[in-house]
Image (spheres, grey):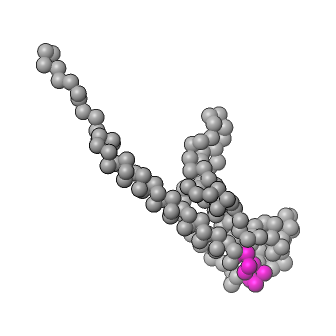
Amino acid sequence: MGNPTDLEPDLGGTGPNNAASPLPGTIPQDTTLAAWLAVLDVLEMAVQAAERTLKDPLGPLSVPAGTVAEPRPEKRWSPPSMPGQLPAAARRRAVALAEAQERVSRRLEEVRQDVARQLQAVSSVPGVGAPSRAIYLDVNG
C-alpha cells in the first residue's frame, strides 16, 4: 500500500488549532468567517476519515467484537450555501485543505486501481467465484 508516513494526516497547519480558528468556546466576530471555519472543519474531518480508511481499510470490520464501531456516513455531501466569499483569514487553511484533498484523492484512486487488479487476477483463476455444482450423480436413488 505504500509508505505509512505518506498517509499521515498533515493538512499543512490547518485544523482547529490553526491561528485562523477561534479558541474553543469563543465566537468569531465575523459570522462569514465563522461559517467558513465550520465548513473547513467538516471538510478536514472528511479528509482525516479518508486517511484513516487508507491506513485501515477494514475500518469497523477490524474492530474486536464487543466494541463500538465508528458510524459510517451514508449520504453524499452537498456544498452549503455560504453567506459570502472566503475571507482572507481562512484562505491559507482552505488552500492547504484543497491540497490535502487532492493528495488523498490520488491515493484513494491508486488503492482502487490496485484492488481492481487484484479482483481481476482472482477472477481469472478457473473455478473461483463459479457457482457450485453437484460433484456426484446418484444413479441408484
Residue 81 vs residue 67, the one in the foreground:
67
Is residue 49 visible in this depiction of the protein?
no
Q: Number of marks in the image?
A: 0
Look at the image and say whether residue 71 sits in the magenta stretch: no
Quadrant hosting residue 117: bottom left
Is residue 85 visible in this depiction of the protein?
yes
Residue placed at 45% from the left, 60% from the top?
113
In the rendered structure, the answer to whether residue 48 lies left or right of residue 17 reads left
Look at the image and say whether residue 90 sits in the magenta stretch: yes
Q: Residue furthest top?
A: 140
- Which segment did they paint magenta? 87-94
x then y, percent, for residue 10: 71, 65
Q: On screen, 3 above or below 88?
A: above
Q: On screen, 55 above or below 15?
A: above
x then y, percent, for residue 42: 68, 65
Q: Residue furthest left?
A: 139
Q: On screen, 25 above or below 92?
A: above
Residue placed at 80% from the left, 70% from the top?
18
Q: Quadrant of the N terminus?
A: bottom right
x then y, percent, for residue 73: 58, 56
Q: On screen, 96 above or below 24?
A: below
Residue 82 vs residue 101, the one in the foreground:
101
Q: Quadrant of the C terminus?
A: top left
x then y, percent, for residue 51: 63, 59
Residue placed at 55% from the left, 67% from the top?
106
> Magenta residues: mostly which secondary structure?
helix
